[in-house]
Image (cartoon, coloured by chain):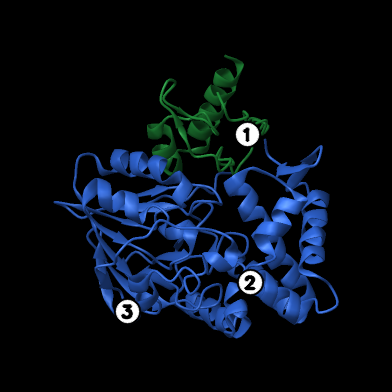
Chain colours: A green, B blue
Amino acid sequence: MSQPISRVAVPAAGVSPVPSPCINVCRMDPQSGLCEGCLRTIDEIVAWSRLSDAGRHAVWAEIARRRER
Amino acid sequence: MSTTAVLPDGMAVIERGWLSSNNIVFDDGGAASVVDTGYMSHAAQTVELVRAALRGKPLTRIVNTHLHSDHVGGNAALQAAFGAQILIPPGLADAVVRWDEEALSYSPMGQTCARFRHDAVIAPGSTLKLGGLAWDVIAAPGHDTHMVALFNADRRILISADALWEDGFGAMLSLLEGDEGFDAERSTLAWMARLAPRLVIPGHGRPFVEVNAALDRAHRRVEALAASPDRNARHIAKVMVKFLLLDLRSLTVPELIDRLTPTRYLMTLQKTFFPDKTGAAVIEQAVTELLAAGAVVKHGDRIENGDL
């Protein structure tokens, strides 16, 4: 990836409100299908505002896994 | 306990960040509309996000609450992709026709924006149908003189643009246009309090339901800033530096100075609030304060955003 990967800490379990993963890069990587900044798919970004806290924590867990790759 | 707001059917709030405004996509039945379109450099992603939210419906209307670069930057790309009509508040419609980047605030902020042509105006006092609901168009000056908010009285939902966020509101840039600023924002907040919304969808940040708490915070912030013109001016300088860094990601201090000192807004700030300083010194102080707050970081001689 050409953009630096966010080091924003994954919020601890149970934290509410769950912060948005957006770090203002907002560019899709065509190879991975993920945003270069927040490492979410288009569908994940669109769905965010309807997710429960549990759903948002699950997205953050997925982002953390994607950072490891 | 979760305070995540529950959103009605027929609308999708795409929460973005600070460089791009939130985008609200409405299902109008046979077609769809979007309110506010983010920043120009994010336009490709905005098109993909809106396309996903449309679920195959045609986008026929783009509605803008105001013309700042972070709210209209995706207009041209969305219009090119979907052929939608563009509806804007009337105040600067003339400047849009001429594409006067000076009057539209883009040059004064050291920013740019993709040109678009509007098709209609949404005037305060009129009503707009979006997502099967009737939205009153309300004047919401303060941050921007010509900004409008949208209110649905049935569900008590307020689309507040940059007049009211969960914690604060957009910087008082209207002051730099020689307009009222604080009095306008006070009046806008009072109006919003009278409407008594149950749900607020702000221009940035998450939708929220704890409206009185947000109004209290905003009210206290107006008074604190109005009581300290110096603090307010330093905040505006920081916003200008931070926005440039959100867009360009990494700049040296001389580069920041080169880009911002010739702008009308920086020059107005300097003349009005820091007459004993140079424009360069105003920017240097803004950088110092942003570093102290961790909003930006220094790597060698480069200033970069603090969250990477």
Q: Where is residue B288 in the image (x, y as percent from the top left)?
A: 83, 55
Q: What element carries label 3?
A: loop
**Which amino acid does the dot numbered 2 rest on?**
Tyr
Mark 3 chain: B
**Which amino acid does the dot numbered 3 rest on?**
Ala
In this rendering, which labeled residue sits more in front, label 3 or label 2?
2
Residue shown at the point (38%, 67%) measured from the top left: B156
Q: Distance between the residues labelled 3 and 2?
A: 27 Å
Q: Which residue lies furthest to the right in this view?
A: B276
Q: B206 left or right of B63?
A: right
**Which amino acid does the dot numbered 1 rest on?**
Gly
Residue at which label 3 appears: B123
Residue at which label 2 appears: B265
Q: Would you say residue B202 is visible in this rendering?
A: no
Q: In which quarter of the image is the N terminus of chain B?
A: top right
Residue shown at the point (48%, 60%) measured from the top left: B69
Q: Position of residue A55 (x, y in %)?
A: 48, 32
Which of the pair B24/B2 is nearer the observer? B24
Q: Distance between the residues labelled 1 and 3?
A: 44 Å
